[in-house]
Image (cartoon, rainbow, N blue to C red):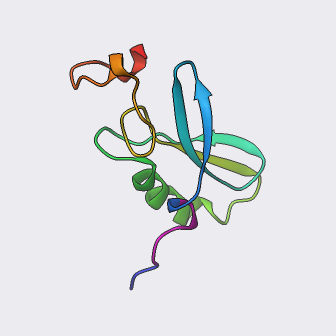
Amino acid sequence: MSRGPLPGWLTGVKNRAGQVVIHCVEHGTGRPVLVLHGAGVDHREAEACFEPVLEGVSGLRRIYPDLPGMGRTIAPGRCAAPTTSWTRC
């Protein structure tokens, strides 16, 4: 049985971190919980894994960012090379 896409898949907010404008999807209110995805995917993987468990928990603001160069977050030129670590942006 398919649930369909989660609401955050088509919406989000943008936050600036230095040169990078980070696309994030947020759910809930309260204590912030930053959920990071792995390499080669975007926020949707983490969101699909964690939201079914956390959506019923009150008091948590879940934040799912797309890391630079993944999803809707564009990496600045110096971070675009595959051998460059995104942490040096």
Q: Residue at x 40, y 23 (%)?
A: 76
The quadrant holding residue 21 is top right
Residue 40 left/right relative to 2: left
Residue 66 percent coordinates (x, y): 46, 41
Q: Nearer the viewer, residue 5 or 52?
A: 5
Q: Is residue 73 depicted above or below 58 in this figure? A: above
Residue 36 percent coordinates (x, y): 47, 39
Q: Residue at x 56, y 18 (%)?
A: 18
Residue 65 left/right relative to 45: right
Q: Which residues are magenta?
A: 4-8
The quadrant holding residue 38 is top left
Q: Tell me which secondary structure the magenta stretch mostly adopts.
A: loop
Q: Would you say residue 66 sits in the magenta stretch? A: no
Q: Residue at x 49, y 55 (%)?
A: 47
Q: Residue furthest bottom?
A: 1
- The C terminus sits in image quarter: top left
Q: Residue furthest front?
A: 77
Residue 38 left/right relative to 10: left
Residue 10 percent coordinates (x, y): 52, 62
Q: Residue at x 31, y 38 (%)?
A: 39
- The N terminus sits in image quarter: bottom left
Residue 3 percent coordinates (x, y): 46, 79
Q: Residue furthest left?
A: 83
Total residue callouts? 0
